Image (cartoon, coloured by chain):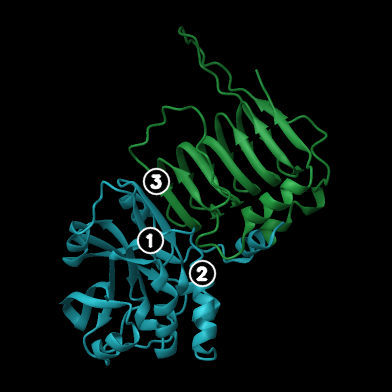
Chain colours: A green, B cyan
Amino acid sequence: MAMFDKHKSAKQDSPVSQEPKISQPAPSMGATAPVTTTKVALIGEGISISGDVKAESSLKVEGRIEGRSIQCSHDVEIAETGHVSASVMAKVVKVSGVVSGDIGGSEKVLISRSGRVQGNITAPRVQLEDGALFRGSIDMNPAEPAASEKPAAVKQTTSKPAAKAPTQGAAATSGAARKEPGLNLKSG
Amino acid sequence: MGAVARTIESGSALPRTGPVTSRQQSKLFPAMFKMMNVNHRLTVLEIGPAMTETVDFFSQFKCRLHFVDLFHEPFVREKQSDLSEKELRHAFEEQFRFPAGTRIDICLFWDFLCYLDDTALRAFNSALRPWLHSGTRAHGFGVHHLAIKLENIQYGVINNETLSIRERRSAQLPYHPHSQIEMHEMFNSFDFERGLLLPEGILEMLLKPRN
């Protein structure tokens, strides 16, 4: 439990006042062909967001997000220090931290060895590393190609098969009633 | 932070099982799969933690996997002898809150039934029944003689003929082996379809719903 308390002192109740960092890998030296760079928006350690997040770049979460959803048109990584209490929808979702909510990946969902997930996963491919803790259901369809760039839809209404408490359900219903601030991350 | 998130965070950070220590061939597992139409979406109930190899195996199918790790539920671990059948049934039903219309094609019980006392076995049986259909098949392990002890292990699926075996990191649950006669009487949502006696007196079981 202690490992999860270390951000509390830095927690902000209002949405981030600081701009998320956009990290951009440096072009490789000597490259002749155009280099495709992947921009990553970072919710850094110590940052806490209450509300929904929409990102048009890839997103890395080292801090804490509590809301209804994270929607990302590229990839989302929840780092070891990251805590998300919301549904996550992206192309590829990698979880090394804690997620309480449904996850939809239009290409793939990976829970790494330090990852802890409670919720339902929908993706063509799902990979759990040894040591990952997962509770919920996994909906897989390997034949379903990642042709559509749209993230897989996460069914909030059917979101509690194996899980005891209705996290996303509760988040969805309460979220519908209250207007929460959101964060729209764009880069490029 | 919601209640469920707290549940996750308060849980042990340690994996619930160790690495794969051995493999076990199964004859009934492939037999079960032959009965399934794998071209349709399979609904699978796994009574245990999500294992890497099990998820990998099922990732070749269009399927929905429900992981319900009853081995680590406090009401199973600590309270089953104190609770009435009604209370236990309610506790199991809480765990089986699947979407409406769910019908389970494959139940993977592993050795869980051997860790339920008579009352808990009846309650588990009742709670599971609404989710079954005539094509449901269940796979599990029992014992041929009640004196036989089971090891504290967790199974996973490597392929449809091979199961993985890992050591559990948690203490072994109180052991309540049942004879086939007891199973027939108390676990009456199912009938034995096939049984296979394995070395060391372990009985591999393939079960089908009782009409």
Q: Amino acid at mark 3?
A: Met
Mark 3 touches mark 2? (CB < 8 Å): no
Q: Let me know if residue B155 appears in the view.
A: no
Image depth: mark 1 or mark 2 in front: 1
Q: Amino acid at mark 2?
A: Gln
Mark 3 touches mark 1? (CB < 8 Å): no
Residue B119, compared with residue A167, is above or below; it is: below
Q: Chain of mark 1?
A: B
What secondary structure is marked by label 3?
Answer: strand
Residue at image location 37% in from the left, 76% down from the top: B112
Q: Furthest-front residue in view?
A: B211
- Using a 10 Å C-alpha cutoff, classify the residue at mark 2 as few (fewer than 14 neighbours), some (14 to 19) or many (20 or more): many
Q: CA distance from mark 1 to mark 2?
A: 15 Å
Q: Which residue is mark 3?
A: A140
Q: CA distance from mark 3 to mark 1?
A: 17 Å
Q: Chain of mark 2?
A: B
Q: Which residue is mark 1?
A: B103
Residue B82, compared with residue A23, is above or below; it is: below
